[in-house]
Image (tube, helix red, strand yellow):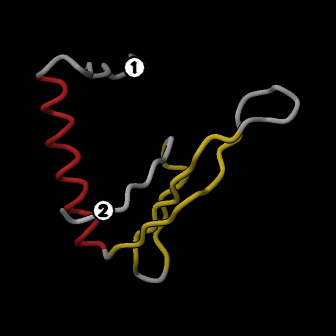
Amino acid sequence: MEHKREIFADGIGQIHFAGGMVRFDFVTLQPNENGGAPTPVVSERIIMPPQGFLGAFNSMQQLIDKLIDAGVLTRNEPAKQ
């Protein structure tokens, strides 16, 4: 069996476009020394071309739709103005 590297992230700290590439900064939450809220710290960066980003976005949207259909997630209603 092929060994695959697993990366854990608590979330994405920032997504930005620079040098013609889309860059995702993944963060992990680190404990605060004085007991306050954890601090997000960049742990990994993924860089991909715009077409790769679009493909990843479409794949994530399809998964979100499946999770909504399964009742795992609920769709947020737009805020009334």
Q: Which residue is at the front of the view, 49 or 28? A: 28
Taking the image as shown, residue 3 lies to the left or right of residue 58, namely right
What crowding class fits label 1: few (fewer than 14 Cα within 10 Å), some (14-19), or many (20 or more)? few
For residue 79, the mark is 1
Residue 60 drawn at (x, y percent): 23, 47
Q: Are marks 1 and 2 in contact (CB under 8 Å)?
A: no
Taking the image as shown, residue 23 lies to the left or right of residue 38, namely left
Q: CA distance from mark 1 to mark 2?
A: 42 Å
Q: Which residue is at the front of the view, 18 or 70? A: 70
- Mark with earlier residue (1, 2): 2
Residue 37, by quadrant, is: top right
**Amino acid on which the number 2 mark rests in the picture:** Lys
**Amino acid on which the number 1 mark rests in the picture:** Ala
**Residue beneath the point at 80% across and 27% down:** 36
**Residue beneath the point at 37% across and 61% down:** 5
Residue 21 drawn at (x, y percent): 40, 77
